[in-house]
Image (spheres, rainbow, N blue to C red):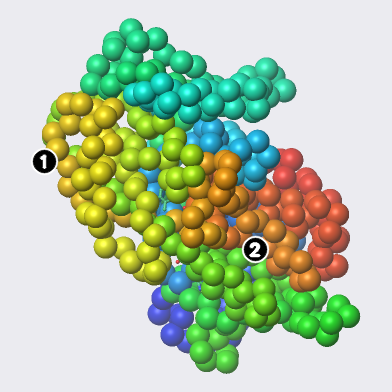
Amino acid sequence: MPPTISPPLLHLPFHTTRARLFSTTAPSRATDFTHIVLGAGAVGLACARRLAAQPGTTTLLLERHRHPGTETSSRNSEVIHAGLYYGATSLKTRLCIEGKRRLYAYCERKRVPHRRTGKWVVSQTPEQAAEVEKVHRFARDVLGRDEEGAWLAPTRWLTAEEVETREPAVRAAAGALESTSTGILDSHAYMQALLGDFEEQGGTTAFASPVVRVEALGRSGGTGAADGSVGWRVWTSDDEADCVTAEVLVNSAGLGAVDVHNMIVPEERRRKAYFAKGNYYSYSASAPKVGTLIYPAPVPGHGGLGTHLTLDMGGRVRFGPDVEYVDSPDDLSVSGNGLAQALDDIAAYLPGLEREAVGLDYCGIRPKLSGQGSVTGGKGFVDFYIKKEDGYHGWVNLMGIESPGLTSSLAIGEEVGRLLYESGHAEPQALDRQQEGKDAASQSED
Ligand SMILES: Cc1cc2nc3c(=O)[nH]c(=O)nc-3n(C[C@H](O)[C@H](O)[C@H](O)COP(=O)(O)OP(=O)(O)OC[C@H]3O[C@@H](n4cnc5c(N)ncnc54)[C@H](O)[C@@H]3O)c2cc1C
């Protein structure tokens, strides 16, 4: 198995580390690696795993922390989403549905703890029921069925008797829509499995390696600007020697992705990152008991899916997340500002709630590309940004990978593979691997 670069090694100049990394069976080439993936969250790991499966390549995964997945990928609801909310034509819908299918199969194959809990979207008023009916119509009329005739995101309205019998503690005065393909997973076990796959395929991971500078190499365009046509150089400290090169750069740096983007592009293409904190609340009482995920009716234009009830793999109830825009991605103090509102929201669908048993738990931060981004389709909706960046060679840029990023991660990995190896725009250096890319993709067992 190739080395995971341990933190003590990173005190050495990076070229010392690189000398070790060259003990690879891959053909020699002008750059140190074929691919560099920035960020070892669920999405970066899935991308790195996919690219490491490409025959004759070498992939380096760079992560600023000492462990994988310590940012957004371990601060979320761990829900395998059905793909009900993100509009007809979005990347979020396509990748969530493909990702859900791949994720269930992967969890089963790799024995990653997961459960098809199902989820109810509950309504208390006719207006809310109308919003939930839109979700149902979307699942039926827009998503529809796959080639074998199965619904892509099966939903059905429950009868009042079913609500009463199956979840007596839950109030759904105007009806409950069931989504049977929604589930939960152990995100940490999932990421460990991805890392294991990546390293078994010959991938190299460098933890404690914060990317501080990125330079496009080569100038093939008419503008004279550097465009990555002969590769990319990435620095992991202010020391000039702490750098490594690759043909392809994948920016999957989550909350840091806009910073990485801004390290590369000219001033007029720089973007602003927005951060929407989601606070979670714990529940210490043993009643009321609920065994299904419960979501309130979606509110159009809202930055989240409402204060929902989710379960972890141990059956522990948690509530949240709410939405609170913050200035810094490091602002991880759990805020109680929204607690009173959250208690009212929860009590609407869980009338037996013991309010004093609800406490502050943890929070996660959504990487947003707009200050008012709506998480559901329609006005204000902002899609995943996953692109081979215009004017550059060999740069796949992933920004705004908020929910359903965890669900979509394996599909995002495949999408990045497709962009690089199947789009008809393969990089000059990579053309000879185009067919191999197709073979690798079609062999995927996810
Ligand atoms: C509150 C909340 C609830 C959510 N609930 C769900 C859910 O139930 N289901 C679902 O599917 N999705 C959910 N999501 C979304 C999901 O968690 C994310 O989409 C997913 O985890 C993103 O993974 P990632 O790898 O892109 O980002 P991250 O997990 O943030 O990983 C990015 C990595 O890049 C590293 N990095 C950043 N900058 C640098 C740098 N300069 N140098 C080196 N490394 C760097 C970071 O340290 C980090 O490890 C939720 C998100 C939030 C915030």
Per the rendering, the mark at residue 303 is none
Q: Residue at the far right: name it.
A: 222
The amino acid at mark 1 is Glu
Q: Quadrant of residue 158?
A: top left
Considering the image in quadrants, where does the C terminus appear? Answer: top right
From what the image shows, is residue 147 above or below residue 382? above
Q: Is tag 1's residue or tag 2's residue first in the polypeptide sequence?
A: 1
Tell me the residue at 78%/71% (across/down).
Answer: 391
Q: Is residue 200 above or below residue 81?
A: below
Residue type at the position of mark 2: Asn
User: Considering depth in this image, is 52 or 221 the residue closer to the camera?
Assistant: 221
**Which residue shows up at 26% across the image and 35% down it?**
346
Mark 1 vs ligand 1: CB below 8 Å: no
* Residue matched to label 1: 356
The N terminus - image quarter: bottom right
* Quarter where residue 214 is shown: bottom right
Question: Residue visible at 54% across and 33% down?
Answer: 84
Horizontal and vertical percent position of residue 138: 59, 27
Residue beneath disc 2: 397
Tell me if 115 is positioned left or right of 351 in this view: right
